[in-house]
Image (cartoon, rainbow, N blue to C red):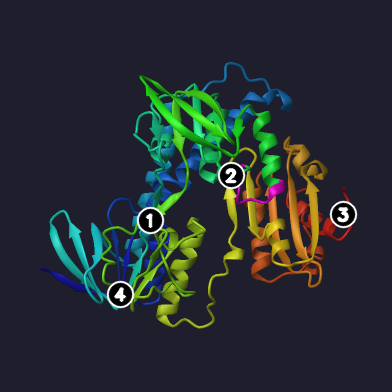
Amino acid sequence: MSQQTFDVVVIGGGPGGYVAAIRAAQLGLRTALVEREHLGGICLNWGCIPTKALLRSAEIYEHIRHAGEFGLQVQGASFDLAKIVGRSRQVAAQLNAGVRHLLKKNKVAVFEGSGRLAGPNTIRLQQKDGVSELHAPHIILATGARARAVAPVEPDGRLVWSYREAMTPDRMPKSLLVVGSGAIGIEFASFYRSLGAEVTVVEARDRILPVEDADVSTFARQAFERQGMKLMTSATVASLRKEADGVIAVIDAQGATTEIRAERVIAAVGIVGNVEDLGLEGTGVRVENTHIVTDAWCRTGEPGVYAIGDVAGAPWLAHKASHEGMLCVERIAGVEGIHPLDKTRIPGCTYSRPQIASIGLTEERARECGHELKVGRFSFKGNGKAIALGEPEGFIKTLFDARTGELLGAHMIGAEVTELIQGLSIGKSLETTEAELMHTVFPHPTLSEMLHESTLAAYGRAIHS
């Protein structure tokens, strides 16, 4: 059996794993990366990136349909679903090749196969041409997560779709049932609704987008319903009967049952960590609720074994995984001045229409934590750039500690808020207060001015509302 020795071996080539491998190599560590399927992981190949390509096509189609509002005349607008899907897959392929190039550029040894722990500092590598061993004092598990399968809506690849089938449909369904209203479910609901499908969303919690601030959830519901979506909250799928080319779902909403017919179902009810077949048995690695337990430096209970990204728990976001990857290897390399990850400083984004973005505490959570609040809110209708863009629907909400002025959270819904959120992400990292934001000069005319106005509004000083 062949054996090779490295300083760091990373299992999993997603946004956590490949970033960790590149950063480790930059720091002078001999680094190997093991990936069994796709460099770039689910995010790049089947998640974050290709879904945004799909949503971009839907967004442009929506603009064309409303061209008359801008003084433009467009006749006979239509879409080619195969080309929309093809562009999405091409985008993923391009970025996959880019990741491979970056790993090669940084001299990371890439092994295509499956890796599992096989004793202290040892990985057993299974490849097409046989089995070998990799040895390293530092092993990083970055194996990601997969969609949760929950009865009776287990994906079957034909009538009940996972995200993979939802991203590569062979034809446009006339009707669609989406089970789950988190970011994944709402993004698919938004995409298919924009292209004309009749969409029903079923959510077990009492509101859609349940991790978002309640005001954002309420506004989003109103916006989606105006678009023609049907949203059912406090509801579950009690049973599912499959027919030749569709399903009949029985929905239980607080004891009242309703039958819904749909050509296809998308299951979007959460994820589970990929912890199987990693050789964790007999080690000090602890797994809770399908996720590996780590400390502030991504260390597991097994010496020399670390875990990052989705397999290490919420929030299940690519940028969280990448940051953990860099944090982990910089700690291994002894880089000075690094700090544990503060998860309240991780922004979250949903690329629906309208877009949604947030960071920090919701208003409800901030009050539960005992904060006395200053709450600011500013509507898109008061912003000149939003009106000029024809995007006057939405708002920005900011939360400050009334005693210290600390920025506790921000919650946004509207055009391009997934880009605006980074301004307050930087603010939280710099531990900003309302004073710094009030004295920041924002360019005019921009959507970013609403960050300023929302801050001013929290202290009764908003100018344009």
Depth check: 241 or 313 in front? Answer: 241
Residue 198 in the magenta stretch? The answer is no
Q: Which residues are magenta?
A: 208-215
Amino acid identity at mark 4: Arg
Q: Residue 462: which numbered mark, if any?
A: 3
CA gap between label 1 and label 3 equals 45 Å
Instruction: Identify the residue at image location x=87%, y=54%.
Output: 462
Residue on which disc 2 sits = 205
Question: On the picture, is 311 further left or further right than 445?
Answer: left
Depth check: 71 or 269 in front? Answer: 269
Q: For the stretch drawn in magenta, what is the main secondary structure?
A: loop
Residue 244: x and y in percent read 35, 19
Amino acid identity at mark 2: Arg
Labels 4, 3: front one: 3
Amino acid identity at mark 3: Ala
Residue on which disc 4 sits = 30
CA gap between label 1 and label 4 equals 18 Å
Quadrant (top left, top right, bottom left, bottom right) of the N terminus: bottom left
Residue at disc 4, secondary structure: loop
